[in-house]
Image: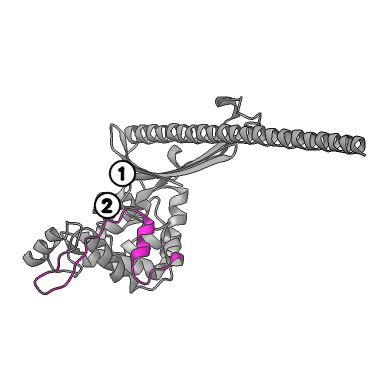
Amino acid sequence: MSRRAGIVDKRRQRGVAIITAMLLTALAITIVASLFWQQQVQVRSMENQRLQLQTKWILRGALDWARLILREDKRYSSVDHMGEPWAVTLADTRLDDYIEKSPIGGDSTDASLSGNIVDAQARYNLCNLARNGMVDPIELAILRRLLINLNQKPELAERIAAMVVASSGGSTAAGTSTTSSSTSTTSSTSSTTSTGTSAGNVEPTLMPMTQIDDLLAVPGLSVEVRDRLQDHVAFLPVSPTKINVNTASPEVLAAVMPLLSMADARALVLQRDRAYFKNIADFKARMHGKAVTLSDSIATETDFFFVVGRVKLDRASLQTLALLQRNINTSTVVWVREN
C-alpha cells in the first residue's frame, strides 16, 4: 500500500512540474511578446515622426517655390490677373522619385503634393473696417452690401465691425473717436485681470483678429455664415488695402462699387476672363459709360497672397495655409497655419 502511494505521489510531482514548466514558458512568451510589441510601437512612432518631418520639409520647399514665383512675377509685371503663372493650380503630383524610398516597415512609398496660390486682395479686407480707432462708415457700407450679395443678414456688418475695432483697441462707435477715459481703460486692461472704468464697466482686452475662424466670436455669426464668407473676406496685416478687379468675385466687385449691380458685376468678370484690365484707366474705359461710382478701393495689382499646400506621405498628411506679402525684392511669410 505504501508502494502504491509512493508511485502516485511521484506522478503528482511530475504533473506539477510539467504544469509549472508550462506556466513559466507561457510567462516567458508573454514577456517576450510584450517586449516585441513595445519595440514595434517605438519603431512605428519613430516612423510617424519621420513622415511628419518629411511632410513639413516638402511643404516648406513648396512655400519657397511659391515665394520665388511671386517675386519673379512682380519683377516683370505690374499687373496681377488669373492668366499669370502664379494662378495655375498644382494638381496632385507624385513625389515618389524625389524622397527616400526605404520606409521603415517595408511599406510602399506613396507621396503626393498639390496646392495653389490665391490672391488675398481678391477678398475684402475686414481690417479696413477699423480706421483711426473707430468704425469707418464707408467700409461698413461695403461690408453690408457684401453680406446682401451673399444672401446673408446685413445687420451682421455692425457686429463684425464692432468686434474688429474692439480687437484693434479702438472705439466701436462709427464716426466717433476714442476718448481719453477709454484710452486709460484700455491701458489698464493690459494686465491679466481686466480693470473697470470709473463708471464700473468692465472692458476686456481682445486678441487681434487674424483668421477667418475668429469671426465665430462675433455674436450671431454661425459656422455656416463663416463658410459662406471665407472665400470673399480676409484679415490682412495692412489696412486699408485695395481690391484687385482682375481677381475679385462678382459679389466683392458689386460691394466696393455701390452702383454696380450683380448682373453687371458678373458680366464684368466674364469680360475680364477674355482680356484682363491693364490698369484702372483701362477698367474705366471698358465700363462703357455706365453710371458706376468708382471706389478708391480698387486696383490691378496685389501685394498679399494666400498659399495653400497639401502633401500626403504614406500614412501622414498635412495641409498648410500661408499668407505672403510681396514687394519688388522679396516675398515675406506673414504667418503659416498647419492643419
Q: Residue at x 12, y 64 (%)?
A: 185
Whole-percent x, y for residue 286 in the image = 36, 55
Which quarter of the rendering shows the N terminus?
A: top right
Q: Residue at x 89, y 37 (%)?
A: 2
Q: Which amino acid type is shown beneath numbered disc 2? A: Thr
Seen in the picture, residue 182 relative to 18 is either above or below; the reply is below
Which corner quadrant of the image does residue 316 belong to?
Answer: top right
Q: Is residue 234 left or right of residue 135?
A: right
Q: Which amino acid type is shown beneath numbered disc 1? A: Asp
Which corner quadrant of the image does residue 131 belong to?
Answer: bottom left
Asked if the residue at tag 1 contacts the one at tag 2, i.e. Cβ–Cβ closer than 8 Å, the answer is: yes
Mark 1 surroundings within 10 Å by alpha-carbon count, few (fewer than 14), some (14 through 19), many (20 or more): some
Q: Principal SS element in the magenta part?
A: loop
Instruction: Assess whether residue 272 is covered by the magenta stretch.
Output: no
Q: Is residue 258 visible?
A: no
The answer to which of 25 and 135 lies nearer the viewer is 25
Seen in the picture, residue 260 relative to 96 is either above or below; the reply is below
Whole-percent x, y for residue 33 in the image = 67, 34
The answer to which of 31 and 49 lies nearer the viewer is 31
Q: Where residue 303 is drawn, which disc sits there?
A: 1
Q: Where residue 241 is drawn, which disc sits there?
A: 2
Looking at this rendering, what residue extends furthest in the left direction?
A: 180
Q: Which residues are magenta?
A: 195-223
